[in-house]
Amino acid sequence: MSAAQFDLSEDPVAHIVSTAKDVAVLPQVVFKILENTGSTEISAGELEKCIVVDPGFSAKVLAMANSAFFALPKRVTSIKEAIAFLGFKQVRTLAMNAGVFDLFVGKTDRESLRRRAWWRHSLDTANCSKWIAGHFHKLNPDEAYAAGLLHLIGRTIMDRSDPELYTTVMAAVDKGVPDLLSERHFFFCDHVDITEAVCCKWGLPSELVSAVCYSRPPKSDEDGFLRACVAVSHVIAGMAINGVGDDRPLSDHFFGWSLEFLNITSNLKEWVDAGIAAIASAQHAG
């Protein structure tokens, strides 16, 4: 598919999502889970640590826990809850059936490099989201982690659907075009659209589906806090890797509505520094 070949009568989001027939996982994550669930001494906490480093497998676990088969009284929004509902045997079976396709490895070194960078950004966003959530009684740190981990999956799925076209997107980004704008120009939708659609397709809870739409102002306060947490963490995670990058006021790098929701505008520098430190601490611990 290319911009010139795209059929404008077809929904671009539906077309791209149709290519995501399964949620891929990192092979090393699968092997780690199989290794640990074969032991009678592993704790639920240790199993959770194996799962949460990978967006693809995390999505699988959450989707299975929320499936109609289990008829749960409430939606499962964290990996910890999902393990409790599924049990070690179900998680092990899921890992065994996961397959070997790696969502974050491309057919070329260039594709692999950018997908690994997105994985790193997702993991850093998740850790920062969990840290921020710990400061607000309205937020569940485990839910915030899951939302941060999943929020860039749409970008990888777009890349999988047409790597050559996404290379064109990245070339425009390298020249200073905002990533969401570049995606919309070439794909007629952006990765937030795809992430939202895929999370809906997987049957994830509405709280998580709303939270991954991090670039959009929420329509209600109920949706706002978790989405704002992810939105702020997404930017801080980028700064942890690349620095601030220019001389604009610090607040200009963020979605303004997200700072207002969390009421961190006046002391933003302190939040950014502490968030970067939380990311570094999580990396060291991992």
Image (spheres, rainbow, N blue to C red):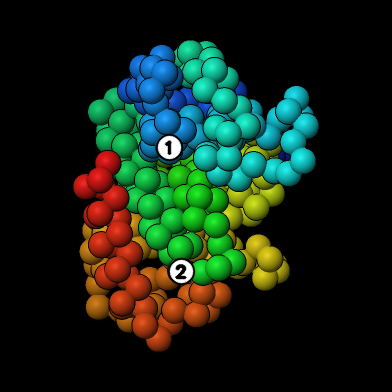
Residue 275 falls in which quadrant of the image?
A: bottom left
Seen in the picture, residue 183 relative to 265 is either above or below; the reply is above
Between residue 7 and residue 131, name the one nearer to us.
131
Mark 2 and mark 1 in contact? Answer it, CB < 8 Å.
Answer: no
Q: In the image, 73: left or right of 257?
A: right
Amino acid type at circle 2 is: His
**Image coordinates for residue 237, horizontal then vertical, percent:** 34, 57
The span from disc 2 to disc 1 (Cα, nearest Å) is: 22 Å
Between residue 40 and residue 46, name the one nearer to us.
40
Callout 2 secondary element: loop
The local crowd at label 1, few if under 14, some if 14 to 19, many if 20 or more residues have their Cα within 10 Å, is few
Judged from this view, the residue extending furthest toward the front is 41
Tell me what residue is drawn at x 56 percent, y 62 percent.
139
Callout 1 secondary element: helix
Labelled disc at residue 188? none
Labelled disc at residue 45? 1
Residue 12 falls in which quadrant of the image?
A: top right
Tell me what residue is drawn at x 42 percent, y 50 percent.
126
Seen in the picture, residue 189 relative to 234 is either above or below; the reply is above
Amino acid type at circle 1 is: Gly
**Image coordinates for residue 3, horizontal then vertical, percent:** 52, 40
Between residue 253 and residue 233, name the one nearer to us.
233
Q: Is residue 66 visible?
A: yes
**Image coordinates for residue 125, horizontal then vertical, percent:** 40, 53
Q: Tag 1 or tag 2, which sits nearer the N-term?
A: 1
Labelled disc at residue 135? 2
Seen in the picture, residue 164 relative to 212 is either above or below; the reply is above
Tell me what residue is drawn at x 48 percent, y 30 percent.
57
Tell me what residue is drawn at x 63 percent, y 48 percent.
209
